[in-house]
Every structure is written in C-alpha cells, then in structure tokens.
Image (cartoon, rainbow, N blue to C red):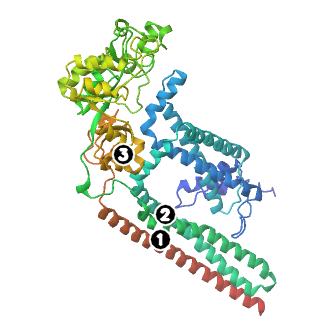
Amino acid sequence: MPKKANRIKPRNQKTRRRKKGIPWIVHIFSHQCYVAAITGCYSCHWKVKQEKKSELGSCCCSWRELLFYPWLLTALCVSVLLLFVWVESSNEYNGFDWVVFLGIGVWFFWSIVLLSLFGILATYTSLLFVLGFLLCWEGIKLHLHWCHKILILLVILICSFFFWLLCTYWKDRWLTIGLSLQVYAPCLHLSSISVMVLLSWPVAFYLIHLEGEARIRRHQMTCYKGKRDKIYNILMNLRALQVAVGLPFFLILLCLYVMPFGNYSPCIQEKDKLGPKPSFFGHRGAPMLGPENTMMSFEKAVEHGAFGLESDVHISYDHVPFLMHDLNLRRTTNINEVLPNASLRHPSLFDWDFLSTLNAGKWFSHSRIKPFYHMKPLSEVDKEKAGNQKIPKLTDLLELAQKEKKFVIFDINVPTPKHFHRVTYVRHLVRVILDSKIEQHLIFWLPGIDRNYVRSTAPGFQHVGRLFPIERLTKENISRINVDYKRLFYNGLREYKAANININLYIVNEPWLFSLAWCSRIQSVTTDNIQVLNQINHPYFFMTPSFYMFIWILMDVVSAIFVFAIFYFHWWRESSKKEKLLKSTSIFMGKSEA
C-alpha cells in the first residue's frame, strides 16, 4: 500500500487562525507587543526574552542600575524646572531675542528655539521615567541602555549650563517665577489635587497588592517554619516598599489639603477692593501693529486706547531730536543697503538729512522673521503703510500727543563724546519740547539729570522717578515712579502705594501679568501688547476669598472620598483573591499532612 503523504502544516498556522469574536487588533497589539515596545524603548532590546518576573519585595534592578537611578531623577527634575522657568518667562522673549541680536547680529526667535529645546529635554526624561515605571509595574528588571545614560548626563550638563547663565546674568528671572506662582497658585493647588486623585488608582493598586502579598507571607511563616527567615526578609521588603510608596503619596496629599493656609495671591480679594483697570503706555507705540518708534506705531497705540506714548530719543549730529531705541541703525532701518559700512555707527553721529532718507518700516513689513513670534499678519493696507515709514522726529510725536491729548514719556540716549550736545543734551531737549507748544502737563519727565533746571524752565512737566527710597521721592516732590514689573514681587510695592505714589510697570505683555498688576492696584503699565491687554475687562484668575474657600473645602472633601473609595475598591478586590488563594493553600497543606 502506498504510504499516505504526510500533510505539512504551516508552522504558524495556529497563530494565523483568528478566534471568533476577538477583534483583529488584539492579535496585532498583544500584551507581548506592549512589553516588547516599552522594553525596547528603555533598554534598546527589542527581542523579548521569557524571563522570570521579579518577585514582589525584591529589587527591580541591579545595584549598578540602582546607583544610576538618582541621575535619571535629577535629569527629570532639572529639565522640567528649566522648562517651567522658560515658559513663565515668556514676557521677556522679545528682550531676550534683542540681546542675542546684539551679540550675533542675526534676528531670530531664539527664545522659541530654547523653548523647543527645553521641551524636548523634559519630554525625553519624562518618557524614560514613565517607561521605567511601566517596566516595574510589569515586574521586569530595569536595564537602561548606555546611550540613554550618556544622554541623561548630557541633559544634566545642558540644564546646569542654562541654570548657571540664569543665575549669573539673569537673576531677576526668579522673581518672574515668584510672580507667576502668586497668580497661578490657586489653580495649581486645585489641579494638583486632581492629579493626586488620578495617581491614587495605581498607588492604591500597588499598596493593596503588596498588602495581599504580605498576608500570604505571614501565612507561609506559620506553614513553612524552615524558611521563616527568608520569608521574614521578604515580608520586611514588602513593608519597606509600602512605606516608600505610600508615605510620600499621603504626605503630598496632606500638604495639598492645607496649602491654602500658606498661599498668597493678590488675585484673591473682595470685589470692592479691586482697583480700576491700569492705563496703558504704548511701548514705542504699538510695536506688534506697526514698526516700533514710527508714527504708524504711535497712531495704532492711540487707536487702541493708549493713555500715553513711550519712546526713546537720540539727538542727531545737527541737533535734531529723533526717535530710535538701539545704539545703531542696523535692526530697524535699511542702512545695510544704503551705507553698510556705517551700520554700526552710533545714531547721534548722523545728520538729520541722511536719517530722514532711511526706511524704518520694511524690516517690519517685508521680513520673514517678525519682531514678535505671536504677531498677527498685517493687512495689505497696513503692510504697505508700514513699508513706507520713516524715522520720526520728536516734534512729530509731540504734535500727535498734543492733538490726541496723550501723555508722553521717554528715555534719552546720551550723545557720543564728540557730539556738540554731549553735556547740554537735556537743556537742548527741553527747549525743543517747549518750542513745540505741547501742554507741559502732558510730558512725563523721566531723566534724572539736571532736574532742577527742568523744574525751573518747564514747571508744568510731571516728574517721574525710579525705584528710589520714599524719603528721596518726597524730598524731590515726585509722585510717580517707573518700575520694572519684577519689583512687584517685593510686597507688591505696598509702601509706595501707601505713600500715594503712582506706579507705572514696564514691560507688561502677558495677560496673567497684567491681571496681577490690576489686582495689585497698579495705576499704569507700559506694554507692547496693547491690542490684547486693552480687551481684558476683568483680571484673570480673580476670585473672592469666600469662593476660593468653598472650592478648596469642596475639592478636599470630594478628593478624599474618591481616594478612600479607590483604596477600598482595590482592598475588596484583592481580599477576595487572596482569600481564595489562602483557602487553596490550606487545603493543599492539609492533604500533604494527611
């Protein structure tokens, strides 16, 4: 009889056969694929070995990996902190880009480049931390690849370098962080409690699971007397894990419950104590709507309700005061096209006949890189108008201010040593202002040089001081000060407000910062972002103490109920499982003894 041909079945026929009722996605994205993915991303080993899972109570990694773990935790903390600091410093992005431009001569959104870099670093370290947690959850021993270890050390070095730069050259950034925490503290408090409620699910699962394992080990100690020491060591490790996981969780939760006792936020106050909305000084006009320090920019500021106009004054070589901020003309004019060899010369070394021919708007309207990263596109009409702007004289600004009844405040740039008005520039400027016939009370006189002469020659000028002691301000009869907004961190400048001194903060661009100034009863702010801030009709994050207390107590009670319910659910589910296991173990032990 001929032999029957053996049927050769495909090797993976069983794996290709799909069970009825099970979706196709389950066959592709199985638990094994999930474990392979997280293991591959963490240790770069993409082939999953059927290793025995680490027992509860035993270490989740080797001693070498355990020694490196603090470096990963350090990298996570410093990268997240650096990202938070830079995000909260968004009010200063334009100033940072300008400082970098002075150094390298190229205008770009360097602040956004750094924001992207810090975001990548924080995301990378957070992802490694989460992957390590998931591997521990699966009971797989940790083995971080050496490439990741090198990158983690590199992250720490990069973050340390930028922290050194911040602490050395930009110390006042930390005051901005303090101000942002004052504003966001109530929201951060409530959102942190919500995060802790979400975290209570895995924490409860892990702690109750450890408790169940501990019950089994205690039962085994009574059954296996010969292995009592080994079982006791495992039991102690389980208890240590419970303390290491549970104690920080509950301490953090308790601190969040009582955090409002130590909170201070100017935005938490009674409605009747909220001051009027601060007025606006257009910083160089409205530089997001038109080229800075041009008549178009100042006209846009007036259109959007500016209380006053802020500018910077240079004096040309032939004695004409004009408006310009920088110490050269290369950023805001086309001098690189007209006279490139003179692009770095001081503006006061040029005659007005030459300055009046330069274009002061094409850099704004026709450049790919705008001065502000969140600027809205210009209309065709505004684009054409901006492209035709010239450098204005001071008298042009004074004429607009007189017509619109707007106040004017400006900084004076000292002329170069060879300039004719090197010593007498203040007196020359006062004469030009008086000759313009502007009402004297519309001038907010900021320069502190030769103040006695200014008082005697132009008694109607309103003098503005810096952050001087109150005794000096009183002696000089100054009732208004111009202050960097970061100084608001120190008691909200309460002593100056108590002395009836009006405060103007510069430069306030972010809505949260403007809201903080409003809640702090600041009279006026200097801003680049007048078109946005003027639309704010009520301070952000404002709430009354009674409302915040109600939300606080409600959140605490509801979160405590949720956390208790989550822990009880896991305890009930684990208890039912362990009872069945203990019964089966007792029956097995009884049969073996029989």
Farthest residue, direction bottom: 594
Q: Position of residue 551 (x, y in %)?
A: 34, 64
At mark 3, the secondary structure is helix
Q: Compare residues 338 and 478 and report the one nearer the observer.
A: 478
Is residue 359 visible to us here?
A: yes
Q: Compare residues 28 and 520 and report the one nearer the observer.
A: 520
Name the image quarter holding residue 2.
bottom right
Q: Compare residues 549 and 497 and report the one nearer the observer.
A: 497
Name the image quarter holding residue 239.
bottom right
- What is the three-letter code of the residue carrying label 1? Val
At mark 1, the secondary structure is helix
Around disc 1, counting alpha carbons within 10 Å, would you say few (fewer than 14), some (14 to 19), or many (20 or more)? some
Q: Mark 1 points at which residue?
A: 563
Q: Name the residue under label 2.
A: 196
Q: Position of residue 562 (x, y in %)?
A: 44, 70
Residue 413 to residue 7: above or below: above
Whether the residues at callouts 2 and 3 have beta carbons within 8 Å, the answer is no
Q: Position of residue 291 (x, y in %)?
A: 34, 22
Residue 565 to residue 549: above or below: below
Q: Earlier in the sequence, mark 3 or mark 1?
A: 3
Gap in angstroms between the C-alphas marked 2 and 3: 26 Å
* Residue name at image x 49 percent, y 63 percent: 196
Q: Compare residues 115 and 162 and report the one nearer the observer.
A: 162
Name the image quarter holding residue 391.
top left
